Structure formats: structure tokens, C-alpha cells
Image: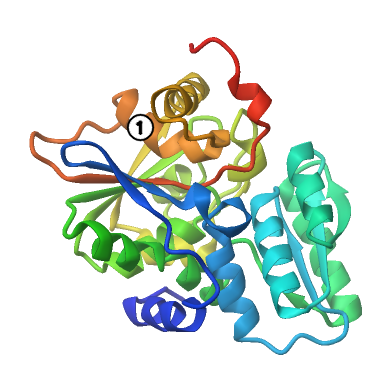
Amino acid sequence: MTVTRADVARAADRIGGYVLRTPVIEVEPGRWLKLECLQHAGSFKVRGAFNRLLGATPPAAGVLAASGGNHGLAVAFAARRLGVRAEIFVPEVCAPVKIAGLRALGAEVVIGGAIYQEALEASGKRAAETGAVEIHAYDQLDVAAGQGTVAPELLEQVGQVDTVVVAVGGGGLVAGIVAGLDGRAQVVAVEPERIPTLHRALAAGGPVRVEVSGVGADALGASMLGRIAYETVAGRVTSVLVSDDAIVEARHALWHDHRIAVEHAGAAALAALRAGAYTPAPGERVAVIVCGSNTDPATLAVTRR
């Protein structure tokens, strides 16, 4: 199953009245930041959550999701907006600021295991017991199509770009963007060296399980790429890896240079440019997706590395 440009277009029509048209800033000539960190609930994931919820009819048990934090926040936000009960399973590595945010949105929070995969399994068992609508963080067509609405919105805002740089966890965002662009720009997919789900999948010819660790684990901590993502993006992206140090440096650069506060995952795509994992050609027009802001701002008040 793959995501298509038509899927993304339908998602854009469905969710238009529920999500923000996030700003784009040009930080230097031909280099833009698409600030999905300013989206409702702090990340792009609310796009997929609304697309899935608006296409379903939840029972009294409401909706369930497993999440490292951002997807859960998105589902909780969408559920509250639509008057639906939400239960969110999170792993032990979920940042406290995200758990607090989930509870503030009225969701019931369940610690579902040590890592995301265990939380996902616990969520699936509960869905089977209750009949609640399960909203997968990335491996559902409606979710990936909703995330992909970032792409046509970006093109409307800046015109043609040559390259879109995007962080990858489970792959919903990169799949949606590849589909939404539909060849109108190349996509550079960026992952932490310590969580190379897409990189390993492309090398193996299909999704394979990887170890999850490092600074991006709470938001990019899927241990296996989604099947929809693999089938959508294989042969259509440039895959690069960045170190934890590069991600930390890019995060601080966003704060110190632009006063943009993001979590580590939100800085991963920019890290690829700053650390040289991807080097644009002269004159190449590049847009970077800054994907999430659910972080403790106190952690930014440190000396830049």
C-alpha cells in the first residue's frame, strides 16, 4: 500500500478547517524553514490525527494511540476538539513535558512499556478489548496522507523548491511528503545514526528492526519503518544519517540564531545541512521541515556546543 498525491489532496480538503497553515521563514537566500513546530499540539502530527479521526466514527470507547509523545499529543488535541475520549499509551522514555501535555489535553495516559514498540503492542491489545478506534503513529494510510499535506502547503508558500529535507522516525511524514510532492522536488530523509530505520530498510529491501537509543528516541524512536512508508519512498529519497552531537548543535542553533525552540527531533533535518550529511549544490533551493517543539525550554538555556 502506498500513499498517493490524490490521497494527500483529499486529506488537505478534509482537515483544512482544523489545522494551522504554519509559517515559512527564509533564513538565507534559497533556504527556508517550514515551522511545523508551531502547529497545533506542537508538531505536524495533528494533520494525520485529524485526517484519521474525521474519516472514522469512534464508539463510546473513543480513540487509542501509542506514541513517544507527539503523536499522542496530536490525537489528544484532535479528540478534544471533536469531543472524543482519548487513551494514549506511551513508553517509559516519553519526555515528562509531553506526558504533562497529554494530561492537560484530557487524555488518559498509560505507560505501555520501555520503548515505543511495547507501547504499541499494549495499545493494540486494548483496542481489541474495547473496540476503540486505533490511530497508528505512522503506518496508516489516512495518517500518512494527513502528514503529507505539509508538502503542497509548502509549495504554495514558497513556489518551486529543489529539495525538501525531513526527519524520519516511523516514516509517516516522509511518505506523505514524497506523495504530496509527487516528483516536484527531491526529498532528503534524515535519521539519527542511532535509530536508522529507513536507512536499514532501504539496504535490506524492506523494514527491519533496529535498536533505539540517543537524543531522538522519544520522537524518532520507532524500531521499524512502517510498511506504507517503505513502499511509498523506496527509490524516491536520499537517505542520510546524522550524529546525536549534530542534532544537539542544530537544536541550539535554531534557538540562538532564530529563537525557535524545538525538541531534538525537530532539529534533525537541519542537522543534516549543518553537519554536511547533505550538501546542497550552488543555487539549490532547499526547504527544511522543522517538525516538533514539544520540549522543556529550560534545556535550551545552556552554552551552545
Q: Amino acid at mark 1?
A: Ala
Determine whether 258 is above or below 76 in the image: above
Residue 93 visible somewhere in the drawing: no
Q: Badge 1, how many Cα within 10 Å: few under 14, some, many 20+?
A: many
Residue 305, percent across and down? 48, 11
Image height check: is 95 above or below 43? above
Secondary structure beneath dot 1 equals helix
Q: Count up the numbered dots.
A: 1
Asked where in the image residue 25 lies, by quadrant, the reply is: top left
Q: Residue at x 53, y 56 (%)?
A: 39
Coordinates of residue 35 in the picture (x, y in percent): 43, 48
Question: In this rendering, would 209 be left or right of 268?
Answer: right
116 or 211: nearer the viewer: 116
Q: Tell me the residue that label 1 is attached to.
A: 272
- Residue 146's place in the image compared with 278, above or below, is below
Query: Which quadrant holds residue 78?
Result: bottom right
Q: Residue at x 33, y 65 (%)?
A: 153
